[in-house]
Image (cartoon, grey):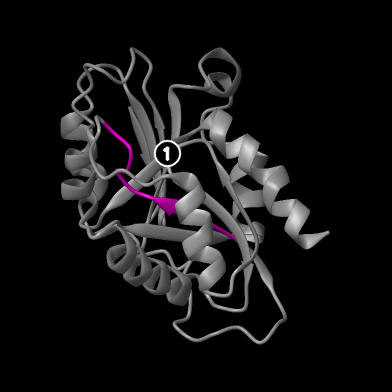
Amino acid sequence: MATSKSSRSTKNSRPPTQTKNAGTAMLALLRGINVGGNKKVPMAELRSVATTLGFTAVQTYIQSGNLVFGTTLTPVAAEATLEQAIQAHFGFPVPVVCRTLTQWERYAQGSAFPDAETERPNLLHLGLAKSTAIPGAAEALARYATAGERFHLEGDTLWLDYVAGVARSKLTPVALDRAWGSIVTARNWNTVQALLPLLREIRS
Protein backbone atom coordinates (compact mmCIF):
# COMPACT_ATOMS: atom_id res chain seq x y z
CA MET A 1 0.00 0.00 0.00
CA ALA A 2 1.44 3.32 -0.98
CA THR A 3 0.82 6.97 -0.37
CA SER A 4 2.85 9.66 -2.05
CA LYS A 5 3.10 13.33 -2.89
CA SER A 6 4.84 14.90 -5.87
CA SER A 7 8.31 13.45 -6.31
CA ARG A 8 9.44 16.86 -7.54
CA SER A 9 8.82 18.53 -4.18
CA THR A 10 11.54 20.91 -3.00
CA LYS A 11 10.57 20.59 0.65
CA ASN A 12 14.02 19.40 1.71
CA SER A 13 16.11 21.05 -1.00
CA ARG A 14 19.52 22.22 0.16
CA PRO A 15 21.70 24.91 -1.42
CA PRO A 16 25.28 23.92 -2.32
CA THR A 17 26.79 26.90 -0.51
CA GLN A 18 28.20 27.09 3.00
CA THR A 19 26.13 28.48 5.84
CA LYS A 20 27.11 31.66 7.67
CA ASN A 21 26.33 30.61 11.24
CA ALA A 22 28.92 29.46 13.76
CA GLY A 23 27.79 25.88 13.82
CA THR A 24 24.79 23.82 12.74
CA ALA A 25 23.91 20.57 14.49
CA MET A 26 24.10 17.96 11.75
CA LEU A 27 23.75 14.23 11.25
CA ALA A 28 25.61 12.16 8.66
CA LEU A 29 24.17 8.78 7.72
CA LEU A 30 26.70 6.39 6.18
CA ARG A 31 25.35 3.78 3.80
CA GLY A 32 26.32 0.09 3.84
CA ILE A 33 29.17 -0.08 6.36
CA ASN A 34 29.98 -2.82 8.91
CA VAL A 35 27.61 -5.30 7.27
CA GLY A 36 28.74 -8.91 6.92
CA GLY A 37 32.35 -7.96 7.52
CA ASN A 38 32.40 -5.60 4.55
CA LYS A 39 33.44 -1.95 4.53
CA LYS A 40 34.59 -1.96 8.12
CA VAL A 41 34.51 1.51 9.62
CA PRO A 42 35.33 1.56 13.35
CA MET A 43 33.37 4.33 15.01
CA ALA A 44 36.40 5.64 16.90
CA GLU A 45 38.25 6.11 13.60
CA LEU A 46 35.21 7.75 12.04
CA ARG A 47 35.03 10.23 14.91
CA SER A 48 38.73 10.96 14.49
CA VAL A 49 38.30 11.61 10.76
CA ALA A 50 35.38 13.95 11.44
CA THR A 51 37.30 15.84 14.10
CA THR A 52 40.24 16.27 11.72
CA LEU A 53 37.85 17.88 9.25
CA GLY A 54 37.08 20.57 11.80
CA PHE A 55 33.70 19.24 12.90
CA THR A 56 32.87 19.85 16.56
CA ALA A 57 31.12 17.89 19.35
CA VAL A 58 31.53 14.72 17.28
CA GLN A 59 29.58 11.65 18.40
CA THR A 60 28.55 8.34 16.85
CA TYR A 61 25.56 6.13 17.56
CA ILE A 62 25.79 2.33 17.16
CA GLN A 63 27.84 0.70 14.40
CA SER A 64 25.66 1.38 11.36
CA GLY A 65 27.25 4.76 10.71
CA ASN A 66 25.40 7.58 12.42
CA LEU A 67 27.67 10.57 12.92
CA VAL A 68 26.51 13.64 14.85
CA PHE A 69 28.53 16.87 14.79
CA GLY A 70 28.54 20.64 14.57
CA THR A 71 29.66 22.37 11.39
CA THR A 72 29.47 25.59 9.40
CA LEU A 73 29.03 23.59 6.18
CA THR A 74 25.73 22.97 4.45
CA PRO A 75 24.51 19.37 4.27
CA VAL A 76 25.57 19.10 0.62
CA ALA A 77 29.08 20.34 1.40
CA ALA A 78 29.34 18.11 4.48
CA GLU A 79 28.34 15.06 2.42
CA ALA A 80 31.05 15.70 -0.15
CA THR A 81 33.68 16.48 2.49
CA LEU A 82 32.96 13.31 4.46
CA GLU A 83 32.83 11.09 1.39
CA GLN A 84 36.23 12.33 0.23
CA ALA A 85 37.78 11.94 3.70
CA ILE A 86 36.34 8.45 4.23
CA GLN A 87 37.60 7.32 0.83
CA ALA A 88 41.06 8.67 1.62
CA HIS A 89 41.23 7.20 5.13
CA PHE A 90 39.56 3.80 4.73
CA GLY A 91 40.29 3.13 1.07
CA PHE A 92 36.74 2.52 -0.17
CA PRO A 93 33.77 4.72 -1.10
CA VAL A 94 30.90 5.22 1.32
CA PRO A 95 27.81 7.22 0.34
CA VAL A 96 26.86 9.82 2.96
CA VAL A 97 23.53 11.58 3.43
CA CYS A 98 23.42 14.57 5.80
CA ARG A 99 20.51 16.28 7.54
CA THR A 100 20.28 19.18 9.99
CA LEU A 101 18.72 19.14 13.45
CA THR A 102 15.73 21.11 12.11
CA GLN A 103 15.09 18.50 9.45
CA TRP A 104 15.54 15.61 11.88
CA GLU A 105 13.12 17.14 14.38
CA ARG A 106 10.47 17.10 11.67
CA TYR A 107 11.10 13.43 10.92
CA ALA A 108 11.07 12.48 14.61
CA GLN A 109 7.78 14.29 15.28
CA GLY A 110 5.90 11.51 13.58
CA SER A 111 6.01 9.12 10.66
CA ALA A 112 3.47 8.41 7.98
CA PHE A 113 2.43 5.30 9.91
CA PRO A 114 1.76 6.12 13.60
CA ASP A 115 0.54 2.60 14.39
CA ALA A 116 3.89 1.11 13.35
CA GLU A 117 5.76 3.52 15.64
CA THR A 118 4.47 1.60 18.67
CA GLU A 119 3.65 -1.84 17.24
CA ARG A 120 6.88 -2.50 15.29
CA PRO A 121 9.32 0.43 15.57
CA ASN A 122 12.23 -1.71 14.38
CA LEU A 123 10.34 -2.44 11.14
CA LEU A 124 9.35 1.16 10.47
CA HIS A 125 12.14 2.73 8.43
CA LEU A 126 12.95 6.27 7.35
CA GLY A 127 14.67 6.29 3.97
CA LEU A 128 16.62 9.36 2.85
CA ALA A 129 18.52 10.27 -0.30
CA LYS A 130 20.57 13.15 -1.62
CA SER A 131 17.82 14.24 -4.00
CA THR A 132 14.11 13.93 -4.60
CA ALA A 133 12.91 10.76 -6.26
CA ILE A 134 12.66 10.47 -10.02
CA PRO A 135 9.25 10.54 -11.71
CA GLY A 136 7.54 7.17 -11.44
CA ALA A 137 9.33 6.24 -8.20
CA ALA A 138 6.10 5.50 -6.30
CA GLU A 139 4.90 3.18 -9.04
CA ALA A 140 8.26 1.41 -9.10
CA LEU A 141 8.25 0.97 -5.33
CA ALA A 142 4.72 -0.44 -5.47
CA ARG A 143 5.90 -3.18 -7.83
CA TYR A 144 8.38 -4.35 -5.19
CA ALA A 145 5.94 -4.10 -2.28
CA THR A 146 4.55 -7.63 -2.61
CA ALA A 147 4.63 -8.69 1.06
CA GLY A 148 2.17 -6.21 2.53
CA GLU A 149 4.68 -3.39 2.96
CA ARG A 150 3.37 0.15 3.23
CA PHE A 151 5.29 3.18 2.02
CA HIS A 152 4.85 6.92 1.83
CA LEU A 153 7.00 9.01 -0.49
CA GLU A 154 7.31 12.76 -0.17
CA GLY A 155 10.14 14.85 -1.59
CA ASP A 156 13.40 13.29 -0.44
CA THR A 157 11.73 11.33 2.37
CA LEU A 158 10.49 7.74 2.27
CA TRP A 159 8.65 6.03 5.11
CA LEU A 160 8.65 2.23 4.89
CA ASP A 161 6.60 -0.08 7.09
CA TYR A 162 7.88 -3.63 6.69
CA VAL A 163 4.75 -5.17 8.15
CA ALA A 164 5.83 -8.79 7.64
CA GLY A 165 9.54 -8.18 8.28
CA VAL A 166 12.54 -7.05 6.29
CA ALA A 167 14.21 -10.38 5.52
CA ARG A 168 11.81 -11.57 2.80
CA SER A 169 10.84 -8.17 1.44
CA LYS A 170 11.69 -7.28 -2.13
CA LEU A 171 12.11 -3.66 -1.05
CA THR A 172 15.84 -4.21 -0.66
CA PRO A 173 18.46 -1.45 -0.71
CA VAL A 174 19.17 -2.20 -4.37
CA ALA A 175 15.46 -2.03 -5.22
CA LEU A 176 15.08 1.26 -3.36
CA ASP A 177 18.04 2.77 -5.21
CA ARG A 178 16.69 1.62 -8.57
CA ALA A 179 13.18 2.93 -7.93
CA TRP A 180 14.40 6.22 -6.44
CA GLY A 181 17.10 6.94 -9.00
CA SER A 182 19.61 7.69 -6.23
CA ILE A 183 21.28 5.93 -3.33
CA VAL A 184 18.92 5.60 -0.38
CA THR A 185 19.97 4.98 3.20
CA ALA A 186 17.48 4.02 5.91
CA ARG A 187 17.20 3.97 9.71
CA ASN A 188 14.47 2.41 11.82
CA TRP A 189 12.14 4.38 14.06
CA ASN A 190 14.08 3.50 17.22
CA THR A 191 17.23 4.98 15.71
CA VAL A 192 15.37 8.06 14.45
CA GLN A 193 14.26 8.76 18.01
CA ALA A 194 17.63 7.96 19.60
CA LEU A 195 19.51 10.38 17.34
CA LEU A 196 17.34 13.39 18.15
CA PRO A 197 18.65 14.09 21.68
CA LEU A 198 22.24 13.72 20.45
CA LEU A 199 21.62 16.42 17.86
CA ARG A 200 19.94 18.65 20.41
CA GLU A 201 22.96 18.39 22.71
CA ILE A 202 25.00 20.19 20.07
CA ARG A 203 22.51 23.05 19.88
CA SER A 204 22.35 23.50 23.67
Q: Which residue is mark 1?
A: 64
Could you tell me if residue 28 is visible in this image? no
Q: Is residue 34 left or right of residue 154?
A: left
Which residue lies at the image location 49% right of the left edge and 86% below the top edge? 17
Q: Residues within 10 Å of mark 1 (few under 14, many from 20)?
A: some
Expressed as whole percent of the image width and height from the top left, the position of residue 181 reads 20, 57
Q: Could you tell me which quadrant the C terminus lies in? A: bottom right
Expressed as whole percent of the image width and height from the top left, the position of residue 103 reads 60, 57
Expressed as whole percent of the image width and height from the top left, the position of residue 167 reads 26, 18
Q: Is residue 52 left or right of residue 35?
A: right
Q: Could you tell me which quadrant the N terminus lies in? A: top left
Viewer-nearest residue: 130 or 161? 130
Which residue lies at the image location 45% right of the left edge and 77% below the top edge? 77
Viewer-nearest residue: 160 or 172? 172
Q: Is residue 90 left or right of residue 50?
A: left
Which residue lies at the image location 24% right of the left edge and 29% below the top edge? 36
Residues in magenta, as a range = 26-35
Could you tell me if residue 58 is visible in this image? yes
Which residue lies at the image location 59% right of the left edge and 69% below the top edge? 55
Is 69 situated above or below 60? below
Is 147 situated above or below 137? above
**Three-letter amino acid code of the residue under disc 1:** Ser
